[in-house]
Image: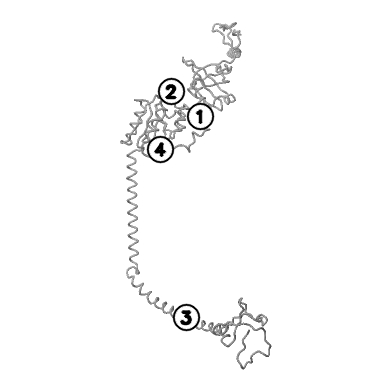
Amino acid sequence: MTSFQADPVPGQPPPADSVRPRESTSDAPTSVARLNDTIRGFIETWGSVWVEGEITSWNVRTGNVFGRLKDLSTDATISFRIWSSTRQRLPADLTVGDHVIASVKADYFVRSGDFSFSVSAMRHVGLGDQLERLERLRAKLRAEGLFDPARKRPLPFLPNVIGLITGEKSDAEKDVRHNAELRWPHVRFRMAYAAVQGDRCVPETIGALKALDADPSVEVIVIARGGGDPQHLLGFSDERLLRAVATASTPVVSAIGHENDHPLLDEVADLRASTPTDAAKRVVPDVVEQRAVVAQLRSRLTMRLFQRVSHDIAQLEQLRSRPVLRTPETMIDARSQQQWLLVARGRDVVDRRLESQARRAAELRAALRTLSPASTLARGYAIAHLTDGVIVRDAVQAVEGAAVLVTVGRGSFAARSEGEVAESARPTPASGPAQPT
């Protein structure tokens, strides 16, 4: 039988010389199973331990993670596994290259003899802490609407002057200027140099941004930096710089690092370029491409104009070939006779209508004359009015001494009533028509 002497201190690994086999010889060796059981029993006395390192492998299978953790100063590595139930409690952005600390417990698998560690907790350190703070800042700025696509301004098609913020004599400056000048030789730049890493990065970049934003000739601003360690790019995720970019009146292009680098400046800027070279291509149009587009449009316009003119000429010839346009007087001659007949018919209708209306007017005039009070007065009758205009219809109305206005067939005269007279005193028909009083 083989046994191992474990360190009596729980949770601590034993010294190298404290584990030695007993009661095992070449004549009486122990079995592999017994050896594995002994090793497992020894390892199970260990507790969990916090270790620090860099993730060099991260493979997900059926929800579990199998990876390796490397020492920061040597090539020493350990294998670890994270069960799916544990993984749900860990940061979601853990990946290869992260600097982490992890709580691990040793596992020894008797059947295969494999040695590994189970992770119960893991979190970022160094850059990891920075990443966690950046994620909180990202959530804060997103909630404020600084990442909203609706607030991003379009870039001018061909900017008059491009403001470029980058390190002096840097590769980023060369890339932007060289590629921009290849695409449009007459492009102009307004340079503003700033530190692109370290403590001076944020204040100098903000100062350069404000200076270019205040220049009315600058139509777009490019902030460019080459690739580098993620720690060196943290300045372009600083909240002060991000808010300065958000409040700038000039469109800003972020061209920081390489394709895989994503500082928060990319989210706030009006346009994200994957590299400084890509920024030059996105900001400045290609003169060769634009000339080709102009030539193509000119060709299409010429063809379209030729087709339109040819179509109009053919349509005009077709119209001119019609009989009515060849001899337009034919239409006038044909219409003249019809017009004469219509005029004659109109005159005849008007004459008949005038005669009919004249007869009707004479009849109405005669009827009106017959019914008119004037015809009655002309036959010798009279109308008596009192001074207030009331017509005298009863003799009692004209009291004795009352002033009466008498209207006859020709004119009127004034009279004074002597009161009502007896029937015998009235004039006889032989003496003329009776006059009302």
* Whole-number angstrom distance, CA of label 4 to CA of label 1: 24 Å
* Whole-number angstrom distance, CA of label 2 to CA of label 4: 28 Å
Q: Position of residue 130 (x, y in %)?
A: 49, 23
Q: Position of residue 132 (x, y in %)?
A: 52, 25
Picture quadrant where residue 283 is located? top left
> Which residue in the protein does label 2 denote?
232
Q: Earlier in the sequence, mark 1 or mark 3?
A: 1
Contact check, label 2 and label 3, Cβ < 8 Å: no
Contact check, label 4 and label 3, Cβ < 8 Å: no
Identity, as a three-letter code, of the amino acid under mark 3 = Leu
The image shows residue 317, relative to residue 329, as above or below, that is above
Bin the neighbour count of mark 4 within 10 Å (Cα to Cα): few under 14, some 14-19, many 20 and up. Answer: some
User: In what quadrant of the picture does the N terminus appear?
Assistant: top right
Identity, as a three-letter code, of the amino acid under mark 4 = Leu
Q: Nearer the viewer, mark 2 or mark 3?
A: 3
Q: Earlier in the sequence, mark 2 or mark 1?
A: 1
Q: Which mark is residue 155?
A: 4
The image shows residue 125, relative to residue 303, as above or below, that is above
> Which residue in the protein does label 3 denote?
354
Q: Earlier in the sequence, mark 4 or mark 3?
A: 4
Q: Nearer the viewer, mark 4 or mark 3?
A: 3
The image shows residue 132, relative to residue 336, as above or below, that is above
Give the left or right position of residue 16, taking residue 225 as reference.
Answer: right
Picture quadrant where residue 232 is located? top left
Observer-nearest residue: 179 or 4? 179
Give the left or right position of residue 368, taking residue 178 as reference.
Answer: right
The image shows residue 391, relative to residue 84, as above or below, that is below
Secondary structure of the residue carrying tag 2 is helix
Identity, as a three-letter code, of the amino acid under mark 1 = Arg
Contact check, label 2 and label 1, Cβ < 8 Å: no
Q: Which mark is residue 138?
A: 1
